[in-house]
Amino acid sequence: MNLIRQAVRIMIFFTVLFPALCWAAQREFSLTIDEVSIDVAPGFSSKVFAFNGQVPGPLIHVMEGDDVTVHVTNNTTLPHSIHWHGVNQTGSWKNDGVPGVTQEAIQPGESFTYKFKTDRPGTLWYHCHVNVWEHVALRGMWGPLIVDPKNPSELEKKVTKDVIIMLSGWESAYANTYGKGGASQDVDDYFSINAKSYPMNQPIRVKKGDVMRLRFIGAGDEQQQMHLHGHDMLIVAKDGYPLAQPYFVDTVPVGPGERFDAIVQMNNPGLFIMHDHIDKHMSNNGAMMGGTMTVIEYDGIPMESWYAWKDKVYDPNFFYSESMKQGYGLFNSAPFMGKPVEQGRRRR
């Protein structure tokens, strides 16, 4: 009788409970690709190809093992595709987003549907794979794809603030001309965090005792050396993969396509800069101070009258921190939206 009962329990587990435990969520999203103009730095704007009309693109936040479907419509005048950078496309190679290899490029006015399983967790991203030297390096065709692990580490469970930092450069010479720029002889002269150069970007506001995770994503075509004052960064993941032996740094090199996750214990109240240690990246077309820099602002620290961001209008979601708290889905961000480019002026 005991053997029969045990057999029944095993049958129930494998027919009812086990499938429920292994069930993957079905996530279905829609993205458009639009031609808009965004303000990057004081006096400098650029025409871009924008996912859902915004740069960076919407946050896509899912769980490891989810089945993801993304319907993409190309509203621009040039062909595009989407590569899901970091997704290994296990059993779904035709969704890797490389024109001429896994698909035909999505032509103007056409749509394409991607279907894949998030086969590994971590800080990933998505970007165009057509003319990447222009569309990705200069035209803002990128966004964050965050895949939570099924089994987070004890340190991950302690994180109170997620901060997504997408690093990129811009070429003012081709800012208003689609189809040009990004060649080997061309030079970036503006640099940004989440498509905004200092002082047009935002501070990172924290409280003493916060555990902050910085997710660095190299979306441009130059390496950037991100240096945080007043704190050490514990590098815990590289390209989405957790490190067996995390290590402390105060400067982390982020190359094109690379991602680094850093955990920072917020235990030193004050105002501290975080910036690119490549000097030209801290300028707006040569004008200091600008480019790739922001400030860590602790709650309760008084701001002097001479502080550059004393009267800054604060956007708590500039680094996707608020969206990351809202669970799983696709999250648009109104402040990242651009202005539509008029039909007759698109190519000039």
Image (cartoon, grey):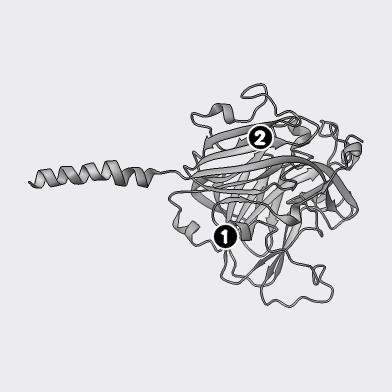
Tell me the residue at 72%/32% (across/down).
80
Instruction: Measuring from the top left, give residue 144's x and y in whole percent.
Output: 64, 47
| Left or right of 301, for residue 85 | left
| 101 shown above or below 228 | above
In this picture, is 287 found above or below 298?
Answer: above
Residue 295 left/right relative to 214 = right
Task: Tell which residue pokes out farthest to the left in this image.
Answer: 1
Q: Secondary structure at mark 2?
A: loop
Residue 65 place in picture, x, y as percent: 46, 42
Asked whether residue 222 appears in the rendered view, the answer is no
Q: Disc 2 and disc 1: Cα gap in Å?
A: 26 Å
Q: Quadrant of the C terminus?
A: top right
Q: Quadrant of residue 108?
A: top right
- Along the line of sight, the residue nearer the viewer: 320 or 212: 320
**Residue 210 image-quadrant placement:** bottom right
What residue is rendered at 74% in x and 28% in y?
107
Other-residue count near label 1 (Cα within 10 Å), few / some / many at <14 / 14–19 / ≥20: few
**Earlier along the polypeptide chain: callout 2 or callout 1?**
2
Q: Name the disc covering residue 25, or none.
A: none
Which three-letter amino acid code belongs to the residue tagged 1?
A: Lys
Q: Secondary structure at mark 1?
A: loop
At 67% across and 24% down in the image, what residue appears? 104
What mark, if any, has residue 325 been given in the picture?
1
Residue 223 at what x, y percent from top left? 72, 42
Report the disc number at residue 82: 2
